[in-house]
Every structure is written in C-alpha cells, then in structure tokens.
Image: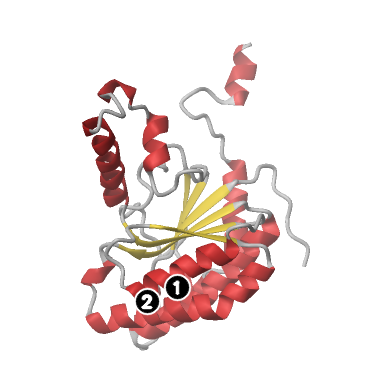
Amino acid sequence: MSEPAFLSMPEHVAIIMDGNGRWAKQRGLPRAMGHRKGVEAVRETVRAAGDAGIKYLTLFAFSSENWRRPEAEVTDLMGLLKAFIRRDLAELHAQNVRIKIIGDRQSLRSDILNLLLEAEETTRDNTALTLVIAFNYGSRDEIARAMMSLAKDIEAGRLQAGDITPELINARLDTAGIPDPDLIIRTSGEERLSNFLLWQAAYSEFVFVPEYWPDFSRELFYAALEKFAARDRRFGGISAQAAAVGS
C-alpha cells in the first residue's frame, strides 16, 4: 500500500489515546478487553506513522492520575505495558525506531522502570521514528520538576533568576531535545488536554475524533494528517495568504 502524500507533514504528532473503557462497555466487555484492543491500535498507529515519515510520535500511555483507578485495572495496564515492550521491542528496534520515555521515574516500581530503561537503551542509536511514551506522566508535574531543577541551580549560585528563559525551561522538561508537537490528536470525542504536554502544546494544531481508541486505524490517522495539512499555521503572526494580499 502506497502512503498518501500531504502538502505539509507534521514533524511531531502526539496522541491522547482515550476511550478504551467506553469501547469495552459499549460491547458488554470488561474494561481490560478495551485496553488489550487498544494495544493493537498502538501497533497499527506506530507503523502508520513510520510509513508516513513522521519523525516523532508521542503516545499518552499512562498518566500520573491513572494510579487512582481500581487496583485490578492498574495491574492489568502494567501487564499490558510489559507485554508490549517484551513482544514489540525487537520489531521496533529492527524498524530503526527509537524509544523515549517521558514522565516521573522516581516513584516507579523497579520492574517497570528497568523495562522502560531497557527499551530506551536498546534503541538509543536508532534514527527513524522516535516513539515517545508518556508514562506516569502529568504535565503540571513535569513543569514543577523543571522549576525545582532551576531553583536548585539558583540556590547553588549556578543561575540568576534573570537568566531563566523559555528556552532554559524547555531544556529542563522531560521532552528536552524533542520538538514541540505540531499536531495533537485525541480520540473518543473528548476535547481537552487532560494535563498532557501543556507547555509544549502552545502552538499545536488539534484534531478531535469521535472514535474510541481501540477503533483508531491507519485511515483515521491519515485523515487527521490531511486535516493538519489544510490548516494555516501562523504562530502568532499573520497567514502567508494574508501577507500576500497585503503586500
């Protein structure tokens, strides 16, 4: 299957994968089945992003608030993460995919943390798609940790308060070295960021799709890319068309 050509291609696409539980409930299935079907959608989307030439794909896998869910569901989600990495790491590595983890690592159990570190280390030199997995991630927590890092440098005399710039803050975020998302997609019909990439989303385009995450497909991904290509991104300035008319 040949990949569609787009007038403009996002370098970085981020996805809020929402609706696994509702997908399962709609079918009279346990929530765990929705999460399992969601993993299949992850595999399909990673392949589609790589085929389309996307350089960075960020997936909101597990938020810092998700620990509040029932213990059985959290345990099942951890099991799915382990299974995904163990099953798919070799294939992703063979496809030259680099894995990067963002989120708070300090409170993670050692078995989960070691698995995530192994995925990063195994793929660190790969140069095709960078798959960013947001795990135990919350944007406010990320920003607070970045501020704490800067405050420690000020206390130690390595920085002055006046030295702090947006670029310096960027460099202390979990996403340091990763371009901001050009496009953020959210499934399930919800239209909010839910504490995801709040700093990085300053100039992102948004596409909200009604389908639940387990039903997300290559076709829906490419449809979102088509919508992105039709957007006029101004970054606070005026559009190219308006500039041409005014000249």
Q: Which residue is at a point 50% across and 46% down the rendered structure image?
A: 181
Q: Give the residue at mark 1.
A: 115
Badges 1 and 2: C-beta atoms under 8 Å apart?
Answer: yes
Quadrant of the rendering where the C terminus is positioned? top right
Quadrant of the rendering where the N terminus is positioned? bottom right
Q: Which residue is at a point 52% across and 79% down the rendered structure image?
A: 86
Residue 202 x %, y %? 41, 38
Residue 141 x %, y %? 27, 51
Residue 206 bears which disc, if any? none
Does any portion of residue 74 appear in the rendered image? yes
Q: In the visual, does 29 lie left or right of 247?
A: left
Q: In the visual, does 35 lie left or right of 244?
A: left
Q: Kindly give the residue lying farthest to the right in the view shown.
A: 2
Nearer to us in this view, 111 or 239: 111
Disc 2 crowd rating (10 Å Cα; few below 14, some 14-19, many 20+) is: few
> Which secondary structure, mark 1?
helix
Q: Tag count in the figure?
A: 2
Residue 111 bears which disc, if any? 2
Q: Which residue is at a point 64% across and 18% down the rendered structure image?
A: 244
Q: Is residue 2 above or below residue 244?
A: below
Amino acid type of the residue tagged 2 in the rendering: Asp
Nearer to us in this view, 201 or 130: 130
Q: Is residue 196 above or below residue 30?
A: above
Amino acid type of the residue tagged 1 in the rendering: Leu
Q: Is residue 242 above or below residue 71?
A: above
> Which secondary structure, mark 2?
helix
Residue 9 x %, y %? 64, 46
Using the numbered discs, state the Cα–Cα distance from disc 1 to disc 2 in whole angstroms. Answer: 6 Å
